[in-house]
Amino acid sequence: MRIGILTFHAVPNYGAVLQAYALQRYLGGCGHEAEFIDYRPAYLTTGGRFHWPKSSWHVKANVVIAYQKVMTVKGLLDADMRKQHDRFDQFTDDYLNLSCYRYKTLNDLRENPPDYDVYICGSDQIWNPSKQHGLDPACFLNFGPNVVEKVSYAASFGCTEIPERHHHEVALYSEALDSISVRETSGCSMLKRFADRESHLVPDPTFLVDWSSIMLAQDTPRLSQGKLFSYVLRSGDGLYDFQRELGEGLDLDVVQPLNPHQRWKSYGEIIPMSPMEWLGAIQQSSAVVTNSFHGTVFAILFNRPFLSVKLGGAKSGLNERMDHLLTSLDLESRQISLADGASATARMKQPINWNRVNERIAKMKASGVDFLSVALCG
């Protein structure tokens, strides 16, 4: 069966590209021919067009668009950012199968629809309304002929609630989907409330594949052996002292991947890493501290001692993904806020019953496998 996957596959984010790779690899292992629908709209690549400021939302959106355009120019001029983008481009070339045609707009998809037996809108926060664009109908597979089976796998809204102006859009856009699965219970709830659609709860596609076997085939440098690996996104406020104190408490040096977009002070050794090197750094580390969903996921999949730091302030709504994951695996005790930093070392040293966690992971994987087996037979 030929399957076209639409997700965030071409962004310089470790979790995004690895979840994309995982779904492709799993489907390929089932005997399907899986490719990514190479959809790269301007609102993701360069910020998109500015809005006529008819409302406060348009004004705020224009600020985000302006920032993205500045970062696009910076990415062309800044050597570190260019090199980091090159690492991700190389990963795409080496590991991801892309459609021969690159789509830049929803109209492109509708006028020249991809030729597959099934479309899957993949995991990650594809249903989280962007600040500059809102919801994208393409991410609900609102294109292509009706004879094509349209499936969502582990799609995420990324938060517990979306703005009211998008409620009707969820109802309208989700009509295109024949089978729906989401990554968090809040997603099930929103689909039921806004669209009266039932949905299945399945794990992120990173849970569908055996990463230890994948890493055996990699020749990754030993960047973090015997060290505390730190991966911080979105906000590093207060984390400098948190990382320093945790590293000192554990008697471990701290190592972090280079983040050219970072706007906060770093602690420890900063190393440029490709996606596979990033995976290897988590696998080799003595412990992991992160405020990233996928940073947490891979610490768990590699059975590394870890702490997952809650996001605060305006970004606290993004904790829903982490809350659901850790609750599902009975690992709530590994979640920590910066205010609890004094207990971080003791909490990191608390043993984790990995046998029990791995049993739960196996059940989660089974739910994803079962959903895809049924959906792809429809």
Image (cartoon, rainbow, N blue to C red):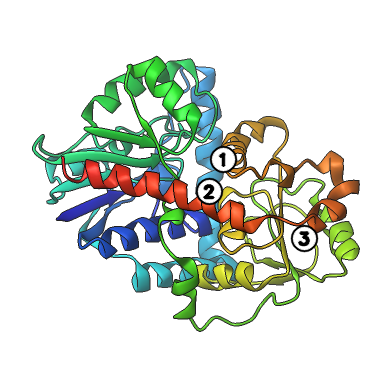
Residue 105 on image: x %, y %: 27, 42
**Quadrant of the rendering where the N terminus is positioned:** bottom left
Q: Residue at x 79, y 55 (%)?
A: 348
Dot 1 crowding, Cα within 10 Å, few <14, some 14–19, many 20+: some
Residue type at numbered disc 1:
Ser
Q: Which residue is mark 3?
A: 266
- Position of residue 263 in the picture relative to residue 367 (left or right): right
Where 134 sits versus 322, above or below?
A: above
Q: Is residue 10 visible?
A: yes
Mark in the foreground, 1 or 2: 2
Residue type at numbered disc 2:
Arg
Q: Residue at x 34, y 45 (%)?
A: 41
Q: Is residue 52 visible?
A: no
Which residue is more in the foreground, 177 or 134? 177
Secondary structure beneath dot 3 equals loop
Which residue is more in the foreground, 127 or 219? 219
Residue 335 on image: x %, y %: 72, 43
Q: Residue at x 70, y 45 (%)?
A: 235
Dot 3 crowding, Cα within 10 Å, few <14, some 14–19, many 20+: some
The mark that comes first in sequence, 1 or 2, is 1
Which residue is more in the foreground, 302 or 111? 302
Secondary structure beneath dot 1 equals helix
- Distance from the alpha carbon under mark 3 to that under mark 2: 35 Å
Residue 45 on image: x %, y %: 42, 50
Q: Which residue is mark 1?
A: 328
Q: Which residue is mark 2?
A: 360
Mark in the foreground, 1 or 3: 1
